Image (cartoon, grey):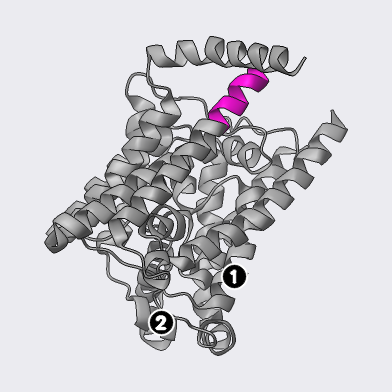
Amino acid sequence: MITERTEVSAQAACATGAPSRAGVPPWLLWGGMIGLVQIFAIATVQPLGVSTAYPQLVGYLVDKIAPGFAESQPYLQKIGTKIGWEVMLIVGIALGALLSRLLPGGDRTAACELPNVFRASWARGLAAFVGGFLILFGARLAGGCTSGHMLSGIAQLALSGFLFGAAAFATGVLTASLLLKRANGGN
Amino acid sequence: MDTMQLLGLLTGVLFGFALHRAGFSRCGLVMRGLAFRDFTMLKVMLTAIAVGMVGAAALATFAPDVAHLKVKSLYVWGVLVGGLVFGVGMAIAGYCPGTALVGLGGGVRDGLLAVAGGLLGAFAFILAYPALEPILIQPLDLGKLTLHETLRLPYLPTALAVAAMLGGIVVWLNRLEAKARA
C-alpha cells in the first residue's frame, strides 16, 4: 500500500516537473534577477532598501512648504532630506515598473487580482491607503522593510532581518488568512 | 544628476522592472501569498534572498573593497513591534513599500493609494519619533549582530549553507504547488 502510494506521488511529481524544465519559470527568472540587482547594489553603493526614502521625500517636500521643518525634526536630522541614492531608487522602481508595463510581455492589467475581501471599491481603496500607512510606520520603527530587512538583512545574515521577517510574517499570515476566510464566506 | 543619484535611479529601474515582471503590481499576489494560497511571493523572495546571500558573502570574501554591506542594528523592541505593525499593513494593502511603487508605476490605483498612505505614515513617524525613540529604539539595542558572527562561524560557508536551505524550501514549495495543481 505504502510503496504504491509513494510510486504514484513520484510519478505525479515527474509529470508536473517536466514542463517547467522546458523554460525558466517566471518566479525563478525574476527572483534570480532581483538577487542580481541586489549584488549590483552592494557592489556599487549599499544593499537595497526602500523605506528610508519615504520620510526623506516627505521631509524634503514639507521643508519646501514650511522651511525649518527638517531642522526641527530629530528623525529628519538623523536620516537627512537629501534627494540622493535612496529617493532616486524609489523613483526608479516606479519607472522600471512603468517600463515593464509598456514593453512587450508586460502585465497591463490595472486589476489587483484581489480575492473578494473588500466588497466595495472605496473600501478596498481605503484599505490600500491604511495598509500603506501601516507598512511605512512599521518599517520606519523597525528600521527597514521587506527590502532593507529581508532581501538585504536576511541576505547578510543579520539577526535584525530574521526577527523582522518572523514578526512581519506572523501578523501578515494571520491578517491575510482572516481576510480571505471572510472573502470565502461571502462567496 | 550626481553619480549617487544616477546609480540609485538605475538600480531602481532594474529592481522595479523585475518586481513588475514577477507580478508584484497586483496586490492579490501578496495577500494570497501571506494566506499560503499561492507560493509565488515566497518563491520569488526566497530565490532573491538566496542569490543575494551568496553574492554578498562572495563579495565580502573575494572583493572586500567593493562589498558595501550594511547590517542593521537589532534593537529588539522597535524591530519586533515595527515588524508586527508592518505585517498587518502588508496583508491589508497587499503591498510593501517597494511593491506599492511597482503598483503605482504599473498603473494600479491601489498602488497609488498605498504610496500615498505610506507618505502619510512616514510623516506620522517623523512626528512620533521623539516619543518612540526612548521606549522602543534605545532600550535593548544589541547592535549589528549577524548569524555567523554570533555563532562564530566562517561567513562564506555559513551563507552558502543557509542559501542552500532556502533553495531547498523553494524546491519544496514548488513541489507542493505542482502537486496541488495536479
The reply to whether discs 2 and 1 touch (Cβ–Cβ < 8 Å) is: no
| Residue at 35% across, 76% down | A79
From which residue to which does the magenta span run? B173-182
| Residue at 51% across, 46% down | B112
Determine whether B38 is above or below B132 in the image.
above
| Residue at 44% across, 30% down | A27
Marking on residue B70: none
Identify the residue at the far right of this view: A185
The quadrant in which residue B38 appears is top right
Determine whether A67 is above or below B96 in the image.
below
CA gap, disc 2 to disc 1? Answer: 29 Å
Amino acid type at image mark 1: Leu
In this orientation, which residue lies closer to the viewer: A28 or A64?
A28
The quadrant in which residue B82 appears is bottom right
Amino acid type at image mark 2: Phe
Residue A71 among those drawn in magenta: no
Q: How crowded is mark 2: few (under 14 residues within 10 Å), some or many (20 or more)?
A: some
In the picture of the structure, the residue carrying the numbered disc 2 is A69
Q: Which subunit holds the residue at mark 2? A: A
The answer as to whether the residues below labels 2 and 1 share one chain is no
Marking on residue B80: 1
Q: Residue B111 in the image: x percent, y percent? A: 52, 44
| Residue at 56% across, 49% down | B113
Q: Helix or strand or loop: what does disc 2 sit on?
A: helix
Q: Residue B159 in the image: x percent, y percent? A: 35, 53
Tell whether A42 sits left or right of B101: left
In this orientation, which residue lies closer to the viewer: B74 or B155?
B155
